[in-house]
Image (tube, rainbow, N blue to C red):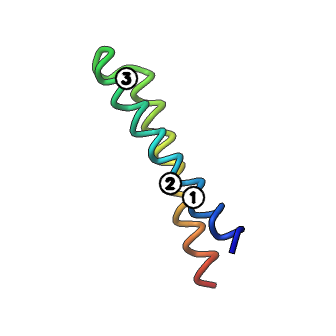
Amino acid sequence: MANDSFLFGGPLVGLAIGALVMVFGIFQGGLNPITLFGGVIGAASIVLLSYAVFQASG
């Protein structure tokens, strides 16, 4: 159970951090490297979340 919580909780925290970084980057001047870095964090979190779902279902 604790392992499942970590597998799902980690990517969800990553999504929140990625969204915050993206919003911060947009307010700092539009589409800049900070905004893109937030998008990369969000995309990586989505991949990890899909992996966690795959592991939990199998």
Where residue 30 sits in the image (x, y, percent)? Answer: 28, 20
Label located before the other in sequence (1 or 3): 1
> Of the residues shown, which amino acid type is indicated by label 2?
Leu
Task: Measure the alpha-carbon separation of dots 1 and 3.
Answer: 24 Å
> Of the residues shown, which amino acid type is indicated by label 3?
Gly
- Which residue is rendered at x = 43% and y = 30% of the image? 21
User: Could you say which is closer to the camera, residue 8 or residue 54?
Assistant: 8
Q: Which residue is mark 2?
A: 12
**Which quadrant holds the N terminus?**
bottom right
* Residue lying at the far bottom of the rendered structure: 58
Neighbor class of circle 1 (other Cα within 10 Å; few <14, some 14-19, many 20+) is some
Regarding mark 3 in the picture, which secondary structure is present there? helix
- Which residue is rendered at x = 37% and y = 24% of the image? 24
Neighbor class of circle 3 (other Cα within 10 Å; few <14, some 14-19, many 20+) is some
Asked if residue 26 lies left or right of residue 4, the reply is: left
Where residue 25 sits in the image (x, y, percent)? Answer: 37, 23
Which mark, by number, is residue 9? 1
- In this rendering, the answer to whether 22 lies above or below 6 is above
Regarding mark 1 in the picture, which secondary structure is present there? helix
Q: Which residue is mark 3?
A: 25
Task: Measure the alpha-carbon separation of dots 3 and 2.
Answer: 20 Å
* Residue lying at the far front of the rendered structure: 2
Task: Measure the alpha-carbon separation of dots 1 and 2.
Answer: 5 Å
**Residues marked 1 and 2 touching at CB (< 8 Å):** yes
**Residues marked 3 and 2 touching at CB (< 8 Å):** no
- In this rendering, the answer to whether 21 lies above or below 18 is above
**Residues marked 1 and 3 touching at CB (< 8 Å):** no
Label located before the other in sequence (3 or 2): 2
User: Could you say which is closer to the camera, residue 18 or residue 36?
Assistant: 18
> Of the residues shown, which amino acid type is indicated by label 1?
Gly
